[in-house]
């Protein structure tokens, strides 16, 4: 039995869940999300909890049990609290700024790089070296943050680039002079 899949999901105040056949819709103060339940998995609402169960013990059902529960948990958390990722821009002359709705990154290329956020994602730049990506869909927030980081990943010699807050960059030693005896 899946340890994660068998745990019930607590539904906080202000969040409503509607189960319509194989579709679960979760709505809260921040927005609304929906997810299609895979075959072999059932979702039931008991009081203020969601219970995810599987019909069989085949490999596909076992693998989808915990995944479905995690996705529903993220939906409930997203519509009630939301998710955010913080990115740090490091390097001489590197900076980030909002230009209208687009994020403009100056990270050592000949021209600034512009990134347009998809619907449901908010990008803020409280300072020139800090980017905050937030939204209700955990997967989309992570995907947009990864896309921004991909523009200039941190390099191991000086640490310049865009990294996640709290991410540790393994530093490498640069070239050293070779002493020859002759």
Image (spheres, helix red, strand yellow):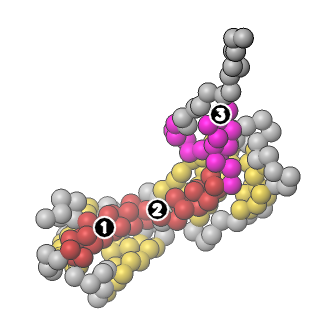
Foreground of the two, 163 or 13: 163
Q: Is residue 152 above or below residue 25?
A: above
- Residue 157: assigned label: 3
Foreground of the two, 97 or 26: 97
Which class describes the residues within 10 Å of circle 1: few (<14), some (14-19), or many (20+)?
some
Does residue 143 appear in this view? yes
Q: Is residue 22 above or below residue 98?
A: below
Residue at mark 2: 138
Q: Is residue 152 magenta?
A: yes
Earlier sequence position, callout 2 versus callout 1: 1
Residue lying at 52% horizontally and 53% vertically, measured from the top left = 84
Residue at mark 1: 67
Is 18 placed left or right of 7 in the picture?
Answer: right
Question: Residue pushed farthest front?
Answer: 182
Is 68 placed left or right of 156 in the picture?
Answer: left
The span from disc 3 to disc 2 (Cα, nearest Å) is: 32 Å
């Amino acid at each position: 039995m899946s340890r994660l899949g068998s745990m019930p999901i607590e539904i906080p105040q202000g969040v409503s869940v509607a189960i319509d056949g194989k579709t679960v819709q979760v709505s809260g103060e921040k927005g609304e999300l929906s997810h299609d339940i895979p075959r072999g998995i059932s979702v039931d609402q008991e009081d203020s909890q969601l219970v995810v169960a599987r019909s069989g013990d085949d490999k596909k059902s076992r693998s989808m049990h915990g995944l479905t529960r995690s996705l529903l948990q993220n939906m409930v958390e997203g519509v009630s609290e939301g998710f955010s990722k913080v990115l740090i821009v490091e390097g001489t002359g590197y900076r980030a700024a909002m230009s209208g709705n687009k994020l403009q990154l100056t990270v050592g290329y000949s021209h600034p790089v512009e990134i347009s956020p998809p619907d449901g994602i908010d990008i803020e730049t409280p300072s020139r070296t800090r980017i905050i990506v937030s939204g209700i869909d955990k997967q989309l927030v992570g995907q947009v943050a990864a896309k921004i980081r991909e523009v200039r990943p941190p390099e191991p010699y000086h640490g310049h680039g865009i990294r996640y807050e709290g991410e540790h960059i393994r530093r490498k030693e640069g070239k050293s002079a070779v002493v020859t005896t002759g």
